[in-house]
Amino acid sequence: MLIALIRNETLKILRRRRFAIVIGILAAILMLISYAQHRQLNENRNRNWRAELQQRVAGYQNALRRGRISDSWARTVRAEVTRLQFYIDHDIEPDKPTAPVVVRLVANVSGWLLPLLVAMLGSDIVSAEHAEGTDKLLLTRPVRRWKVLLSKLITLWMFATLTLLAAAILAWLVSIPILPRGGWNAPMFNGFRLSAGTVSVDQVRQLPLWHDALIAYGLQWFALLTVASISLMLSVIFRSSAAAIGTMLASLIGGSILTRVSPDWTAGKYLFVSALPLADYYSGSPPPYEGMSMTFCILLLAGWAAAATAVAFGLFTQRDVFG
Amino acid sequence: MRHSITGYSTLAPTLIASHLTKTIGKRVIVDDVSFELFPGEVFGFLGPNGAGKTTTIRMLVGLIEPTSGQVTICGHDLVKDFEAAMRCTGCIVENPDLYRFMTGRENLEHFARMLGVRDKEIERVAELVSLAHRLDQRVGTYSLGMRQRLGIAQALLGNPKLLILDEPANGLDPAGIREIRELLRNLAEERAMTVFVSSHLLAEIELMCDRVAIIHRGRILHTGAVRDLISNQRELELRVSDIARATAIANERSIVTRVANDRLLLAMEEEDAPPLLRALIEDGIDVFHVQRKVQTLEERFLEATGGETVG
């Protein structure tokens, strides 16, 4: 029975052309990224990457010495300096543009884009039924309401997964005509740790790119499932696609503004948007607040997803359906 | 209690609505509504705008939870045994809203999957509402009448025992209305289906329904056989030269009279008319016009609701 319901929901998403729009947006943006990498590759041909890195490090250190930057920004800069120094010390050219690098980048670069696209898919999965009046038919069939909503949640999770896979596949497809295809085994470095304002390289691990990419994608996937669950809740609450997607957009953007504007208000770390760029944190950009370990972030997102799902089911199964 | 003139009262009711009440805040929208529907009858549900018609229908199909009261369909309690109750029910609530971005066939397949019904059913119900030829076009291109047909087709999937239709005549042309009316009568008479129809077209109810309930301000004012409703009050309508004297003569013969639109209305049977008419003429009153008047459902309805319009 649940399989039949999921088939129905899948059909509706496809027929509404929501997923086609997602693929279109992804393709457009990935082509731009890939093209930018292609230009960088051409420019880099005769470049001394070592000298450039050293110059960047020197620039950052000057800025730090002058001390006119905020504490939180200084932390970020220090982390970056340590990371760049590591590449110089080990004589490794960072992020040499190849097709695999573009694929790997997508897990981070599209950190805000993918949640947005998933939110777009999710915000009208319940509200559109209400707007079009079809909920009256959907909920008067011999199927309990919780099953109807569960099929919608599972379908949404499926499409969140498909969105991520599509991003990876499209990144590969648009890159291979203009960038080198090899490089899945190129070394990637991870584990730059921020502790008490300094950066340590003790736990830096070297992984082949494909392995590193798998981890980054896995984390991004988890973040997307959370976004899917929250947008389902918004869709149930608002019964209007515009209000649901607007709220999601506002929380995504508002959250990232908040972390920048008042990094000292530490309660901000409990917002789901603070923990959402899991893949970024994994790749080395420092989380905006102290005490946001990877475990903390994952648990926080799981908590938000569970709460949102509980609210969605509670409301959906109890609520009177008026016109 | 007499339930139906067609004699189905010995059968178990398909639907029992008992003491349905819906209160929102302090406002009572539906107040203690009760009725029973029997197999093989077409039951009309009549009421002006805002009378609580739609709220009642939404309670019958589980979209709205009653504040108090209970709905039983085919012996299953709607709340406790929702799936079994709805398996016996096909419905259209308010408008025939279907997925406009899908074809008629895809819509039917969608709901057939929810019922676990085979694809052959789709052809059958499409044939019943004469929609088979347009089934592969997008519902967005359908006229309201065609969506109405598709809505009915959808409601017929899975052979329900109870059909609940909200304004099924909406958007249909006279030929279409007639076709649907015949279809519904057929389903009731030949398959012993119970058909519940709400309508603001009194003439439709009069033609289509066996029994009718009139709802007004959330309360049921009257439930009964349509035939009884329109014929239990027989009057003779007279146009005479002197209403006052004619009234006096009629009252002498202990006939109840009333006056409306310069006409004298007498509560009496046709057979008793000649002696009275003779008396009137002998008294020098001119009689221009005598007619037996059967009160229409519309008049009964306006009388029951205190003259408010139907909607």
Image (tube, grey):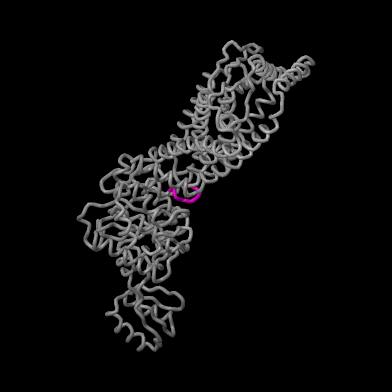
Q: Magenta stretch: residue A43 in it?
A: no
Q: Is residue B180 left or right of residue A95?
A: left
Name the spot of residue B151 as percent of width and height, x first: 39, 57
Span colored in magenta: A129-135
Q: Tell me if residue B14 comes above or below residue A195 in the rendering.
A: below
Name the spot of residue B45 as percent of width and height, x first: 37, 58
The residue sitting at the left extreme is: B10
Q: Nearer the viewer, residue A279 or A134?
A: A279
Residue B196 lies in what quarter of the image? bottom left
Q: Tell me if residue A51 comes above or below residue A104 in the rendering.
A: above
Residue B281 lies in what quarter of the image? bottom left
Q: Is residue B84 left or right of residue A229?
A: left
Q: Is residue B38 left or right of residue B311?
A: left
Rendered residue at 39%/78% (across/down): B247
Rendered residue at 40%/46% (across/down): A8
Q: Nearer the viewer, residue A265 or B163?
A: A265
Determine if residue A103 is in view: no
Name the spot of residue B56 as percent of width and height, x first: 40, 51
Quarter holding the N terminus of chain B? bottom left
Name the spot of residue B103 as percent of width and height, x first: 43, 56
Residue A50 lies in what quarter of the image? top right
The residue sitting at the front extreme is: A46
Determine if residue B81 is in view: yes
